[in-house]
Amino acid sequence: MRILFVCTGNTCRSPMAEALLRDKLKGVAGVEIKSAGVAAFDGEKASENTLLALEQRGIQLQHSAQRLTGDLMKWADLVLTMTRGHKQVICDLYPDRVDKVFTLKQYVGWRGDEDVADPYGGSLEMYTICADELNQLLEELREILTTSPSRE
């Protein structure tokens, strides 16, 4: 299973989701995880508060942003976006791949707003709140990945 998390700039939410899920799946074979942004600048580092929010959880992150590409879309078995807007952009750009694109909340069966709030430019507290929300969603995703033979 190859999972691609997507947000806007690939400096906050998607690298945070990537790092958190990697941590949750330590020792689980057969899952690869990457992240990208629909408007990312290749090589940009993760935001300082992203790094700090992860460090609070004992997770170190070395990250370079990358823009979403056709090659990444081909690589991924599952594309999980942070917002409905990201999902729509991807579906518009890659209409032949829409069957594997979901918001993260949609995929795990979350009820209510499908968007993960963007902490970009906010305080460390905003990033911590975002990390807490992602952590909860990714725990549900971990359950799906480790207990379901197939999600299709």
Image: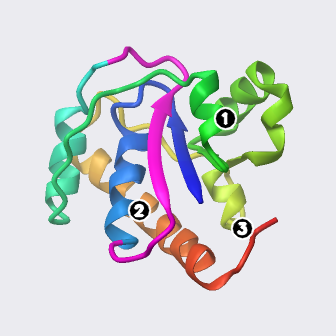
- Bounds of the magenta segment: 26-42
The quarter holding residue 101 reads: top right
**Residue 146's x, y, as percent?**
56, 80
- Looking at the image, which is closer to me, 10 or 109? 10
Magenta part, dominant SS:
loop
Q: How crowded is mark 2: few (under 14 residues within 10 Å), some or many (20 or more)?
A: many
Asked if residue 33 lies left or right of residue 42, the reply is: right
Q: Are marks 1 and 3 in contact (CB under 8 Å)?
A: no
Q: Which residue is drawn at 60% across and 39% down?
A: 75
The kind of residue tagged 2 is: Leu
Name the residue type under label 1. Lys
Q: Specify which label sits upstream in the sequence, 2 or 3.
A: 2
At label 3, the amino acid type is Gly
In this view, the residue in front, 68 or 125, is: 68
Q: Mark 3 points at which residue?
A: 109
The residue shown at (41%, 65%) is 135
Residue topped by disc 2: 21
Residue 77's place in the image compared with 21, above or below, is above
Give me the residue at 15% from left, 61% from top.
Answer: 56
Look at the image and tell me in which quarter the N terminus lies.
bottom right
Mark 1 or mark 2: name the one nearer the start of the chain: 2
CA neighbours of label 3 inside 10 A, class few (<14), some (14 to 19), many (20+):
few
Q: Number of labelled discs?
A: 3
Residue carrying label 1: 74
Number of residues whose C-alpha sits closer than 10 Å to that of mark 1, classed few (under 14), some (14–19) or many (20 or more) = few
* Residue 120 screen position, x and y as percent: 35, 31
Q: Do labels 2 and 3 touch, CB within 8 Å? A: no
